[in-house]
Image: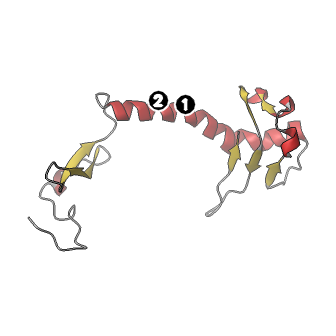
Amino acid sequence: NSKTEGEDPIASHPHRQKLQKRGSVYILQHQESSTYQVCERHLLLQSNEEDRLLMQDLAYYSRYAQIIYKRVQPLTVEEFGLEDNATHFTRGSDTLFESRYRLSSLDCEHAMLSYACFLNGIVSTPYAIL
Protein backbone atom coordinates (compact mmCIF):
# COMPACT_ATOMS: atom_id res chain seq x y z
CA ASN A 1 0.00 0.00 0.00
CA SER A 2 1.88 2.97 -1.38
CA LYS A 3 1.32 6.46 0.00
CA THR A 4 1.95 9.70 -1.84
CA GLU A 5 4.55 12.02 -0.36
CA GLY A 6 3.09 14.29 2.32
CA GLU A 7 0.12 12.01 3.07
CA ASP A 8 -0.21 11.12 6.73
CA PRO A 9 0.08 7.29 7.03
CA ILE A 10 -1.46 7.33 10.49
CA ALA A 11 -4.61 9.22 9.48
CA SER A 12 -5.61 6.45 7.08
CA HIS A 13 -4.48 3.52 9.23
CA PRO A 14 -7.33 0.96 9.41
CA HIS A 15 -7.09 0.57 13.20
CA ARG A 16 -6.97 4.31 13.98
CA GLN A 17 -10.37 4.21 15.70
CA LYS A 18 -9.12 1.45 18.03
CA LEU A 19 -6.22 3.55 19.36
CA GLN A 20 -6.55 3.71 23.13
CA LYS A 21 -6.56 7.25 24.51
CA ARG A 22 -3.49 7.97 26.66
CA GLY A 23 -2.59 4.30 26.62
CA SER A 24 -0.94 3.99 23.25
CA VAL A 25 0.44 5.88 20.27
CA TYR A 26 1.22 5.00 16.70
CA ILE A 27 4.88 4.67 15.77
CA LEU A 28 6.78 3.79 12.62
CA GLN A 29 8.58 0.50 13.10
CA HIS A 30 11.54 -0.29 10.84
CA GLN A 31 11.20 -3.55 8.91
CA GLU A 32 13.97 -5.82 7.58
CA SER A 33 13.00 -4.81 4.03
CA SER A 34 14.14 -1.22 4.83
CA THR A 35 10.54 -0.03 4.95
CA TYR A 36 8.46 1.19 7.84
CA GLN A 37 5.18 -0.13 9.17
CA VAL A 38 2.70 1.80 11.31
CA CYS A 39 2.32 -0.01 14.64
CA GLU A 40 0.55 0.72 17.89
CA ARG A 41 2.87 1.19 20.88
CA HIS A 42 1.38 0.87 24.38
CA LEU A 43 2.83 3.34 26.82
CA LEU A 44 4.25 2.85 30.28
CA LEU A 45 4.13 -0.91 30.53
CA GLN A 46 5.95 -2.58 33.40
CA SER A 47 7.07 -5.27 30.99
CA ASN A 48 8.81 -2.70 28.77
CA GLU A 49 12.35 -2.09 30.02
CA GLU A 50 12.57 1.33 28.31
CA ASP A 51 9.37 2.47 30.02
CA ARG A 52 10.57 1.26 33.43
CA LEU A 53 13.91 3.06 33.05
CA LEU A 54 12.14 6.21 31.89
CA MET A 55 9.90 6.20 34.97
CA GLN A 56 12.91 5.71 37.25
CA ASP A 57 14.60 8.72 35.63
CA LEU A 58 11.44 10.80 35.92
CA ALA A 59 11.11 9.99 39.60
CA TYR A 60 14.75 10.97 40.18
CA TYR A 61 14.70 14.23 38.18
CA SER A 62 11.23 15.36 39.30
CA ARG A 63 12.75 16.16 42.68
CA TYR A 64 15.12 18.63 41.02
CA ALA A 65 12.32 20.10 38.90
CA GLN A 66 10.29 20.77 42.05
CA ILE A 67 13.28 22.49 43.64
CA ILE A 68 13.94 24.63 40.57
CA TYR A 69 10.32 25.67 40.08
CA LYS A 70 9.33 26.24 43.71
CA ARG A 71 12.27 26.56 46.08
CA VAL A 72 15.38 28.01 44.44
CA GLN A 73 14.14 31.60 44.13
CA PRO A 74 13.14 31.95 47.83
CA LEU A 75 16.43 30.29 48.79
CA THR A 76 18.48 32.88 46.86
CA VAL A 77 16.64 35.66 48.70
CA GLU A 78 16.90 34.10 52.16
CA GLU A 79 20.40 32.59 52.04
CA PHE A 80 22.28 34.41 49.28
CA GLY A 81 20.90 37.95 49.80
CA LEU A 82 19.33 38.36 46.36
CA GLU A 83 16.61 40.99 45.94
CA ASP A 84 13.08 39.54 46.11
CA ASN A 85 12.19 40.82 42.63
CA ALA A 86 15.43 39.66 40.96
CA THR A 87 15.00 37.74 37.72
CA HIS A 88 18.38 35.93 37.74
CA PHE A 89 20.96 34.55 40.09
CA THR A 90 24.54 34.36 38.85
CA ARG A 91 27.76 33.79 40.71
CA GLY A 92 31.30 34.24 39.52
CA SER A 93 33.51 31.37 38.41
CA ASP A 94 35.89 32.25 41.27
CA THR A 95 33.19 30.98 43.66
CA LEU A 96 32.79 27.66 41.86
CA PHE A 97 33.81 25.50 44.83
CA GLU A 98 32.46 27.62 47.70
CA SER A 99 30.30 25.41 49.88
CA ARG A 100 28.05 28.33 50.86
CA TYR A 101 26.19 27.74 47.57
CA ARG A 102 25.26 24.16 48.47
CA LEU A 103 21.55 23.45 48.51
CA SER A 104 21.69 21.74 51.91
CA SER A 105 18.60 23.54 53.20
CA LEU A 106 16.68 22.01 50.25
CA ASP A 107 17.87 18.47 51.10
CA CYS A 108 20.24 18.52 48.11
CA GLU A 109 23.57 18.89 49.88
CA HIS A 110 25.33 17.27 46.91
CA ALA A 111 24.22 20.11 44.58
CA MET A 112 25.47 23.68 44.37
CA LEU A 113 23.63 26.51 42.64
CA SER A 114 25.62 28.19 39.88
CA TYR A 115 22.95 30.04 37.89
CA ALA A 116 19.19 30.47 37.97
CA CYS A 117 16.61 32.29 35.85
CA PHE A 118 13.35 33.06 37.62
CA LEU A 119 11.38 34.38 34.66
CA ASN A 120 8.23 32.41 34.06
CA GLY A 121 5.83 33.01 31.24
CA ILE A 122 4.81 31.88 27.79
CA VAL A 123 8.35 32.04 26.40
CA SER A 124 10.56 32.00 29.48
CA THR A 125 10.66 29.05 31.83
CA PRO A 126 12.49 29.06 35.16
CA TYR A 127 15.60 26.92 35.19
CA ALA A 128 18.78 26.53 37.18
CA ILE A 129 22.23 25.07 36.76
CA LEU A 130 23.03 22.89 39.76
- Relative to 91, 36 lies left or right: left
- Residue at 71 percent across and 39 percent down: it is 130
Q: Indicate which disc residue 60 carries.
A: 1
Query: Of all residues shown, which one is farthest toward the front?
Result: 33
Amino acid bearing label 2: Gln
Residue 48 got which mark?
A: none
Q: Are marks 2 and 1 in contact (CB under 8 Å)?
A: yes
Instruction: Please tell me which residue lies in front, 78 or 26.
Output: 26
Left or right: residue 31 versus residue 94 is left
Colour scheme of this structure image? secondary structure
Residue 117 percent across, percent down from the top left: 73, 52
Q: How many marks?
A: 2
Q: Where's residue 6, x and y in %? A: 25, 73
Which residue corresponds to the image point at 60% horizontal and 33% vertical from the top-left? 63
Residue 106 lies, with reference to residue 13, above or below; the image says above
Q: Position of residue 67 (x, y in %)?
A: 67, 37
Residue extending farthest to the left is 1
The quadrant holding residue 11 is bottom left
| Res 93 quadrant in image | top right
Q: Residues within 10 Å of mark 1 (few under 14, many from 20)?
A: few
Label 2, on which residue?
56
